[in-house]
Amino acid sequence: MSINTIVPHLVVNDGEAAIAFYQRAFGATLEGKHAEDGGKRLIHAHLKLGGNDLYLHDDFPEFGEHGAQAPARLGGTSTTIHLEVDDADAAWQQAVDAGATILMPLDNQFWGARYGQLADPFGHNWSIGGPTT
């Protein structure tokens, strides 16, 4: 077996708002989306962040505990999605300006990176890292 890539697939409580946030916060571009029959919830959305893919869909609580659940229904998340960038300060400010909440301030870290952690409005944690300044 060989793995060609890993694609984060997020469950959110408002897919359209999540797409708009990721576009503002991280410069994502929308590749495509599909709504359920009534058009109120997203079954699948495909975004690009740089050269990387990000998938998302709305929470479907009617599938109960066996369906994928948004962090709000789970009481939090256990995953952090890391963005490695050339200019951590610019990427950080863009995300904060778009509405991300600071969890760990951006700073030069002991391991030699400029690094910090944020939460998006949908309960997912993100870290941003790059060269120290």
Image (cartoon, grey):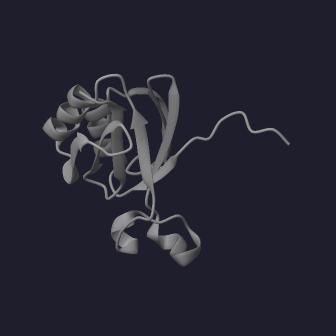
Outermost residue, left direction?
97
x and y, in percent, of residue 25 in the image: 26, 34
Q: Is residue 64 left or right of residue 16?
A: right
Determine the image quadrant of residue 99: top left
Outermost residue, bottom direction?
65
x and y, in percent, of residue 8 in the image: 53, 45
Would you place residue 85 above or below residue 123 in this image?
above
State the residue at coordinates (29%, 24%): 87
State the residue at coordinates (20%, 31%): 94
Q: Is residue 86 left or right of residue 44?
A: left
Looking at the rendered image, the quarter that the C terminus falls into is top left
- Whether residue 19 is visible to the viewer of this picture, yes or no, is no
Q: Is residue 53 left or right of residue 86?
A: right
Q: Which one is nearer the viewer's eye here, 16 or 72?
A: 72
x and y, in percent, of residue 7 in the image: 57, 41
Q: Which one is nearer the viewer's eye here, 31 or 127?
A: 127
State the residue at coordinates (51%, 41%): 55
Looking at the rendered image, the quarter that the N terminus falls into is top right
x and y, in percent, of residue 44 in the image: 51, 44
